[in-house]
Image (spheres, rainbow, N blue to C red):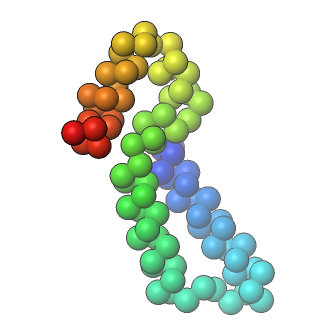
């Protein structure tokens, strides 16, 4: 399961918790839609998802520093740095 999928599942669970604390009344559908759209955009554009899990970070940390730097500056954040 990808980090974005895991976050989506966590968000669904969180919405159920909110519903439970609101006498089983769900949030308004328009509000849920706004939250889903926000997080879909965030998850799609969050470059840090490339190293979201401990396994991802473990692989990255084993690479030589010049390759790690290149991953960040020439790939993940190139558009930001330009």
Numbered-mark total: 0
**Outermost left residue:** 82
In the image as oriented, which residue stretches furthest toward the top? 64
- 73, 45: nearer the viewer: 73
Examine the rendered structure and indicate whether residue 18 appears above or below residue 57.
below
Residue 62: give x, y in percent of width and height: 50, 13
Q: Residue at x 77, y 89 (%)?
A: 23
Seen from the viewer's position, the closer of residues 16 and 66 is 66
Q: Would residue 54 be found to the left or right of residue 47 on screen?
A: right
Based on the displayed image, in which of its 4 quarters is residue 15 positioned? Answer: bottom right
Q: Nearer the viewer, residue 61 or 22?
A: 61
Q: Is residue 2 left or right of residue 69?
A: right
Quarter holding residue 66 = top left
Residue drawn at x 38%, y 61% as measured from the top left: 41
Q: Which residue is found at the position 59% from the left and 30% from the top?
A: 54
Residue 16 x/y as whole percent: 67, 74
Q: Residue 14 at x, y = what percent?
A: 66, 67
Quadrant of the frame with the C terminus: top left
Q: Work out whether 81 lies above or below 36.
A: above
Eyeballing the image, is 68 above or below 20?
above
Residue at the image point whose x is 45% and y is 77% from the top: 34
> Picture coordinates of residue 74 (x, y %)?
26, 28
């Amino acid at each position: 399961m990808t980090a974005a999928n895991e976050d989506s599942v966590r968000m669904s669970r969180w919405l159920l918790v909110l519903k439970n604390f609101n006498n089983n009344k769900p949030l308004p559908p328009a509000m849920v839609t706004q939250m889903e759209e926000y997080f879909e955009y965030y998850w799609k554009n969050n470059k840090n998802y490339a190293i979201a899990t401990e396994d991802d970070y473990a692989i990255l940390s084993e690479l030589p520093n010049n390759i790690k730097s290149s991953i960040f500056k020439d790939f993940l954040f190139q558009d930001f740095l330009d």
